[in-house]
C-alpha cells in the first residue's frame, strides 16, 4: 500500500521560510518522479514542484526561485524548501506521485500571515 505522510508545516510571517518533508512507503521510491501540490481554501489543487527519478526538477512560474524540491532515495523522503513565503502561499501542502496529486498524503498546513 502506497503511503505518503507530510510534515513540517506551520505559521510564518511574509518573507519567512519553511522546509516540508514527506516520508514515503509501499513502493520503490527511487524509481518514481514525485511532486508537491497544494490546495488553498476554496481553490483547486495546484502543482508547485516536481522531481524526476533522475533528480531533474521543474516548477511552475509562480514559485521559480523561491521553492526547491529535493529527494533522499536512500531513506525514501521528499523535501520542499520554501523561501520568501507570501500570504498567497497559504494552503495545505501534499506530496504526491504525480502533478495531479495521485496518492497524496493527509497534508500539512502552511499559513503565511503578519
Image (cartoon, grey):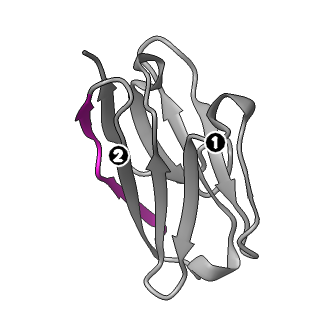
Residue position marked by numbered label 2 in the rendering: 18
Does residue 3 show up magenta in the picture?
yes
Q: Which residue is painted at 43% across and 40% down in the image?
A: 93
Image quarter (top left, top right, bottom left or bottom right) of the C terminus: top left
User: Does dot 2 land on a helix, a strand or a loop?
Assistant: strand
Q: Which of marks 2 and 1 is nearer the N terminus?
A: 2
Residue 47 appears in the picture as rendered: yes
Magenta stretch bounds: 1-12
Which one is in front, 37 or 72? 72
The picture quadrant where one finds residue 108 is top left
Q: Which residue is painted at 55% across and 45% down in the image?
A: 67
Q: Are marks 2 and 1 in contact (CB under 8 Å)?
A: no
Can you tell which of label 2 and label 1 is closer to the viewer? 1
107 sits to left or right of 38: left
User: Does dot 1 land on a helix, a strand or a loop?
Assistant: loop
Is residue 86 shown above or below 80? Answer: above
Question: Where's residue 101, x and y in %?
Answer: 59, 44
Is residue 40 shown above or below 46? Answer: above
Question: Where's residue 97, x and y in %?
Answer: 61, 58
The picture quadrant where one finds residue 66 is top right
Q: Main secondary structure of the magenta part?
A: strand
- As drawn, the label of residue 65 is 1
58 sits to left or right of 96: right
Amino acid at each position: 500500500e502506497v503511503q505518503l505522510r507530510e510534515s513540517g508545516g506551520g505559521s510564518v510571517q511574509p518573507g519567512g521560510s519553511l522546509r516540508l518533508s514527506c516520508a514515503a512507503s509501499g513502493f520503490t521510491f527511487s524509481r518514481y518522479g514525485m511532486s508537491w501540490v497544494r490546495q488553498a481554501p476554496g481553490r483547486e489543487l495546484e502543482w508547485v514542484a516536481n522531481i524526476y527519478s533522475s533528480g531533474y526538477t521543474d516548477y511552475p512560474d509562480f514559485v521559480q526561485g523561491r521553492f526547491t524540491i529535493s529527494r533522499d532515495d536512500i531513506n525514501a523522503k521528499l523535501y520542499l524548501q520554501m523561501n520568501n513565503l507570501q500570504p498567497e502561499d497559504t494552503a495545505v501542502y501534499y506530496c504526491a506521485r504525480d502533478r495531479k496529486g495521485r496518492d497524496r498524503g493527509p497534508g500539512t498546513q502552511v499559513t503565511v500571515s503578519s
